[in-house]
Image (cartoon, grey):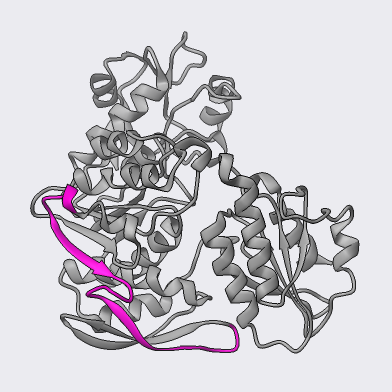
Amino acid sequence: MRFTAAQVAQVVDGKINGKDLELNGVTQDSRTVTPGSLFVPLVAERDGHDYIDQAVQAGASAYLTNGEQATGATSIQVEDTASALLSLGAAARTSIQSPVVGITGSVGKTSVKDLTTSVLSQRGTTHSSPRSFNNEIGVPLTLLNTPEDVTAVITEMGARHVGDINKLCSIARPDIGVITTVGAAHTEIFESIETVGVAKGEIIENLPANGCAILNADNQEVMKQATRTRAQILTFGEKGEIRASDIELDAELRPSFQIETPWGREKVFLQVRGKHMIPNALAASAIGLFLNMDLSKISAGLSEGTLSPARMEFQTAPSGLLVINDAYNANPVSTKAALDALASVKKSGRKVAVLGLMAELGAQSSRAHEEVAEYAHSLELELLTVGTDLYGQEPEEDIDKSLSGLTDGDVALIKGSLVAGLQSLAKRLIEE
């Protein structure tokens, strides 16, 4: 998205120092600066102002600052750079005439975003948030980096408190809102699943009357939110209007199924792995159907869809060990789904679940970890734990050594919240 430094200054009520330049794109990370972009230094654990020189050297044409001008480049002085970023995101939204999709839920936001991007790309240029840009930083950045020829924009919306999604919706103003599921995630903050549902339901409360709410019909807490929207409602799942039949998994757990809809039926073949990806594909399909896409185009998009890193990645180690890297994040719902996937792998050797901490579960944490351990044992999986005793067993002191004997015919699932740091373990296993 192109704009001028003077336009930025007007939107953020800032003082411009230097030339009025044309800018293209925005970043808060000096390592991702592109020529001609605007750099927004944010103050968190590190002060982004310390990286202004680096950003300018990398090609940023201008930057925001809450202090004095630091270099000879064009600067725009503001009271607070974070607030200015929100204002810029809201202003960018007014220039986007194509549909904007907002996706939230306890599990599956990024996977639905990835699959929806692939589906909607069949109808034209589709822009979506990189990685998990789902907060008050990521959402405005997604909007500000929208291409000029875009035909759809897809944003993720996360929440740690009631009211967070309302704030994000005031910036992104989605036309289509998706709630993937409501489950035990961030319950340390939300305290109950019911409160999680209330928070996620804010997304459909903010939809326009001519918009569409895409809801998981198989999740009771999701469906409780349905009365909060004036928009059209489309449901997906076993009980939904858009559902899957004749489900099959190949040797690498890639699903195929018949998609059943009020608009007809079509065969679908997914490249993503795990039966639990089918509801995500159905949600993406519902978005395409609301936007009047043919089922054949939706099926083609789903067949080309891939996921962001560390989400059900199948990789083979030099030893022949099959590694399922699902270590990006974890909560009870996603971990049980990953365990189901591990149990479904057609391998004759050992099936080992390597689990790290499921973070931010609050008072429910101990019982939630115990239930996951019980579930793993019910599937007759070997369970190794890392960095926590909440699963009811002693964690492995040397997990690399514990896994060293695994070879061809064996499979290991690596799963945990980001704080568990298990992505590095998955990388080591593949590189050994």
How far across and how far down the image is residue 327, in percent?
Answer: 64, 58
Specify the quadrant that holds the C terminus: bottom right
Residue 126 in percent (x, y) is at 31, 60
Viewer-proximal residue among 356 and 51:
356
Q: Nearer the viewer, residue 8 or 259?
A: 259
Q: Is residue 80 above or below residue 334?
A: above
Q: Quadrant of residue 86?
A: top left
All told, the count of numbered labels is: 0
Is 384 left, or right, of 273 in this rendering?
A: right
Q: Residue at x 60, y 53 (%)?
A: 368
Whole-percent x and y of residue 253? 56, 82
Expressed as whole percent of the image width and height from the top left, the position of residue 352 reads 75, 72
Viewport quadrant of the N terminus? top left
Give the side of residue 51 with respect to residue 92, left or right: right
235 to the left or right of 139 = left
The reply to whether residue 333 is in sight is yes
Q: What residue do we see at 55% from left, 24% from top?
A: 44
* Magenta residue check for 237: yes
Q: Does residue 121 appear in this view? A: no
In the displayed structure, would residue 27 be above or below residue 99? above
Residue in the image at 64% along x and 75% along y: 342
Q: Residue at x 31, y 43 (%)?
A: 198
When asked about the image quadrant of residue 180, the answer is bottom left
Q: Nearer the viewer, residue 259 or 127?
A: 259
Q: Residue furthest left?
A: 209
Per the rendered image, the range of residues in magenta is 227-252
Please state if 31 lies on the left or on the right of 160 as rendered: right
